Amino acid sequence: MNTRALDKIERCKARCLLSHPWWASLMLQLRFVESERHLTMATDGTHLFYNPDFTAAISDTECCGVLLHEAAHCALLHCFRRHHREPLLWNIACDQAVNALLNADEIQLPAGCVPPGDLNKTAEELYQELLKNAIKISCPMDVLDAESSQKTEYGSLTEENWKQVIAQNRGLEPKNISRTIENNSQPVKNWKEELARFIFSFAKSESHTWSRYSRRFTGLPGWNKEPKTTLAICIDTSGSIPDSILNLFISECSAILKISGITAFIISADSKITGLFEPGIELPKTLVGGGGTSFIDCLEKSESLNVEAVIYFTDGEGEYPSSCKIPVLWALTQRCKTPFGESIFLGE
């Protein structure tokens, strides 16, 4: 064990508690582990790994900054939110998001770190910008996936554990980052339940009854007779949708089509419509696409089909029409704002 590095860690912990108590309270939730596998410092949401040579070489001020940088990754739940995203690009986006917060709180970081991003953007939004512009920055991997990282005999800190820590310390964080923290620690909704409620909200009122409950969806009404609800389900097949996510979209479409009495038109599209499948036609296992993204053709076609509502499976990045005449539920693979309609985040 490198005693010089360990002494610096202990000294900087105490210094952080005095200068930045809120950040430090998060940092102290982590278990410190000396590790030469990591070039600088890293966290998996349970441990804070520090390279002894790197730690010994930087100043106390820089060491405090890196310690608080790793704590901020935990505050924003970055170790739990990568999902399907490319690890290095996700790491860069997370560093941009964290460094924007630290910069706003005047916390100094070592030279050569990833430049801060837009303070008002989430890591998911910054990731999408990096992906779109094909930007990569050379940086050490310090955001480790919580599920695949090293386990401990004392148990791991979960996403829910971190949300509880943040909730217990609400009101003590620096004011200029309060909204960002709130956006990343709000209660998680079960997206499958939200999707089911949206679908059932358009069933004819005489079709369902609260005298018995649905066997398929907990807490929803059973049926007096067959409903006659018709939906349009749009699937984004653009080049930004990886095969694993496209398979998720197709799987959820198939589940919706199995709901008793629900009929649906399935429309696949990238920048233009690439496929239209009428009710009763079996959905193929693969869909055509790979181009850019526009939601205009799909929604205009949905309006012409005389359906009750639209469900659009997408990453949310594309050209939107100014409005849609029928209700739209955006089923999104990343957190982003849509100009109209409701939205659910499939990552939850």
Image: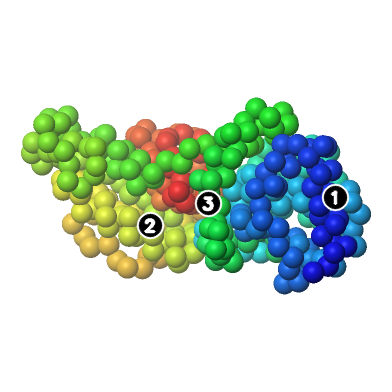
Going by the numbered disc 3, the residue's amino acid type is Thr
**Is 289 positioned to the left or the right of 40 in the image?**
left
Residues marked 1 and 2 touching at CB (< 8 Å): no
Q: Residue at x 55, y 41 (%)?
A: 163
- Give the position of the N terminus as an image quadrant: bottom right
Q: Secondary structure at mark 2?
A: helix
Choose mark 1 or mark 3, whichever is in front: 1
Disc 3 from disc 2: Cα separation: 27 Å
Mark 3 vs mark 2: give the one in front. 3
Q: Is residue 319 left or right of residue 45?
A: left
Mark 3 residue element: loop
In the rendered structure, find residue 158 and report the number of the disc placed on it. Answer: 3
The residue positioned 85% from the left and 57% from the top of the image is 7
Q: Position of residue 192 (x, y in %)?
A: 34, 47
Above or below, comparing residue 181 to residue 284 in the picture: above
Provide the residue designation for mark 2: 249
**Residue 226 appears left or right of 243:** left
* Residue 177 appearing in the image: yes
Residue closest to the eye, 247 or 139? 139
Q: Is residue 293 left or right of residue 310?
A: right
Residue identified by numbered label 1: 11
For mark 1, does the 10 Å Cα neighbourhood hold few (<14), some (14 to 19), or many (20 or more) residues?
Answer: some
Type of amino acid at the residue the image marks with label 1: Arg
The mark that comes first in sequence, 3 or 2, is: 3
Front tag of 1 and 2:
1
x and y, in percent, of residue 306 in the image = 26, 39
Can the viewer see residue 139? no
Please state which of residues 24 and 189 is positioned toward the viewer in this rendering.
24
